[in-house]
Image: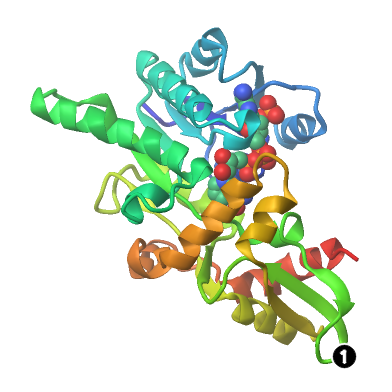
Amino acid sequence: MTGDAPTVVLGGTGAMGSRVVRRILATGTGDVRVLTRAPLSPKARTLAELSDRVRLVPGDLDDSVSLEVVMAGAARAFCNTDFFATGSVPGEIRQGRAALEAARAAGLDRVVWSSLDSAAGLTGGAVPVPHYDSKAAVAAWIAAHRADEAMRLVDDGFFTHHVSILTTAPYFENFTDKLSPIRRSLRDGRDGLHFALPLGDGRYPQIALDDIAWFVDHMLRHWQSWGARDLAVVGDSLTGREIAATFEEITGVACEYLDLKLDVLAASMPEVGHDYAALAAFLQRRDVFALDRDVAVLRRMHPGLQTFRDWLVADGATAVLDSARR
Ligand SMILES: NC(=O)c1ccc[n+]([C@@H]2O[C@H](COP(=O)([O-])OP(=O)(O)OC[C@H]3O[C@@H](n4cnc5c(N)ncnc54)[C@H](OP(=O)(O)O)[C@@H]3O)[C@@H](O)[C@H]2O)c1
């Protein structure tokens, strides 16, 4: 059933979704449908120019008719909703549930929900992270449906057999925009790059966008073959000092780490600074790489899974250098 039937990518014009679209185009033969609010945007047009198998579907996650249209006749879907588009936990939960309900109504065979760790859940309620916990709330809603299907002995339950949750991690590519380093004199007097990161002595779990896309495509093509319904991915985990030292080693450019304080981060961005500061507090408190991922299984599934060093050597270092601010 899944062979040549279309695959839907929600968030397909975005940083994550566009890599998924490219990967699916490379490994499959069916059409890839991308729901977009702006089919004439440069990102949408770039995607459409990749292949005549890319179908842009004008619409909105908040418009149930466009969700029906994009799902009709499709076999598979990847859903990456964007918390920051609404900046609202109920808003993202509403969009996620609507997307999954539309996929169920259309009888899709394989749906991957792009999630993030439940920060509140993993810290005993101490550190809620709005943009993490809203995706995790949809994952919990999926789990509740699975439990309900189990209780009612539903044969071939949609949420049990046709939905998988992929928990991702921050992208290495953030170092080319949100986290790009600053060119300045370092404490030891050398000119170089300053990585100001809110990590304290904690570790930053990350992954390459192409590896997220690899796992999504693998999940859609080799359905629940990895020993579970769901999967949590990551590529590497480094301290701030290790990030700066690795970048210096690969590029030869002097680098240093500055521990960005959480209150400074919170005050640095209107409306979402406190959300990013909460994420940093969560990552300082919880080593998700060590505790919440099975990296050995991930590497067995995907031997090409990139470390930060691999990603820098491939082409990341050039992109980070190009993005460095003054
Ligand atoms: N940055 C990270 O390291 C990271 C890591 C893991 C997860 N995430 C999560 O990924 C999400 C953002 O995805 P991204 O990084 O790909 O961001 P992005 O590049 O800003 O893309 C956002 C995507 O969401 C789509 N979108 C937003 N509102 C929509 C709506 N109402 N209806 C239909 N489509 C809508 C946009 O489509 P159009 O504009 O074409 O309509 C676009 O495709 C966030 O929730 C973030 O928490 C980020």
State whether residue 53 appears in this view: no
Give the left or right position of residue 181, taking residue 241 as reference. right
Residue at image location 59% in from the left, 55% down from the top: 277
User: Going by the image, does 253 lie left or right of 93?
Assistant: right
Check the image and report above or below for 171 versus 51.
below
Which residue corresponds to mark 1? Answer: 189
Q: Is 146 drawn above or below residue 277 in the view shown?
A: above
Vertical relation: 83 (above or below) 176: above
Q: Residue at x 53, y 36 (%)?
A: 80
Quarter occupied by the N terminus? top left
Q: Position of residue 94 (x, y in %)?
A: 47, 22
The residue shown at (51%, 71%) is: 203
Quadrant the C terminus occupies = bottom right
Amino acid type, callout 1: Gly
Residue 190, horizontal then vertical, whole percent = 87, 89
Placement of 102 over or under 298, stated as above or below: above
Q: Where in the figure is residue 306, as x and y percent of width and height?
A: 55, 68
